[in-house]
Image (cartoon, grey):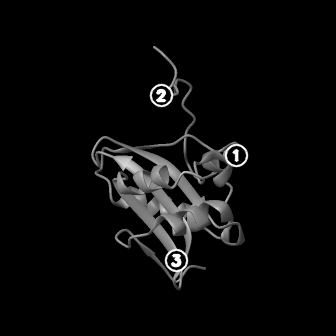
């Protein structure tokens, strides 16, 4: 189990990429683009982290207005620590930082589609995405 959780401990690109590689998210994140990874960290509104001593073992990275909606863009837990409640605790910590009317929104990794309904998330049938390179 982690030694502690934090909402104010800063992390660097190397720590973030290392954790993404130790979880299942590296295959769907730009881990080979340091500038993009740095921007992802710099522009996140909320970072909740889990630590085992000084080793980053979990993160919930969100973009939010804190009152109406919160997009949980990355939920990553080191494979060696998965199924121990860290992901759920990171979600709880994220939610504790939001106002009472805020909804938490996420797009699930393919391997995690069965996880979210088990912890109380509801599927939403009308989510849409478009790549920034695709013309409107």
Of discs 2 and 1, which sits in the foreground?
2
For disc 3, the marked residue is 51
Question: Disc number at residue 114?
Answer: 1
Q: Position of residue 30 (x, y in %)?
A: 57, 48
Q: As drawn, is 72 to the left or to the right of 66?
A: right
Question: Which residue is at a point 54% across and 51% down the rendered structure image?
Answer: 33
Work out whether mark 2 precedes mark 3 in sequence or the reverse, and give the earlier one. 3
Of discs 2 and 3, which sits in the foreground?
2
Q: Residues within 10 Å of mark 1 (few under 14, many from 20)?
A: few
**Count of numbered labels shown in the rendering:** 3
Work out whether mark 1 precedes mark 3 in sequence or the reverse, and give the earlier one. 3
Under tag 1, what secondary structure? loop
Question: Disc number at residue 132?
Answer: 2
Q: CA distance from mark 2 to mark 3?
A: 34 Å
118 shown above or below 16: above
Q: CA distance from mark 1 to mark 3?
A: 25 Å
Question: Which residue is at a point 34% across and 46% down the rendered structure image?
Answer: 64
Q: Position of residue 100 (x, y in %)?
A: 30, 50
Question: Which residue is at a point 28% across and 45% down the rendered structure image?
Answer: 65
Q: Are marks 2 and 1 in contact (CB under 8 Å)?
A: no
Q: Position of residue 9 (x, y in %)?
A: 38, 73
């Amino acid at each position: 189990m982690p030694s502690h959780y934090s909402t104010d401990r800063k992390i660097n690109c190397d720590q973030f990429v290392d954790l993404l590689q130790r979880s299942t998210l590296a295959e769907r994140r730009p881990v080979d683009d340091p500038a993009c990874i740095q921007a992802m960290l710099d522009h996140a509104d909320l970072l909740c982290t889990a630590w085992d001593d000084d080793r980053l073992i979990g993160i919930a990275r969100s973009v939010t207005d804190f009152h109406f909606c919160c997009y949980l863009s990355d939920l990553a837990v080191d494979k060696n620590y998965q199924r121990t409640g860290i992901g759920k605790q990171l979600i709880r910590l994220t939610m504790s930082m939001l106002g009472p009317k805020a909804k938490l929104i996420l797009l699930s990794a393919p391997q995690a589609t069965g996880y979210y309904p088990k912890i109380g998330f509801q599927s939403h049938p009308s989510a849409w995405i478009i790549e920034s390179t695709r013309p409107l």
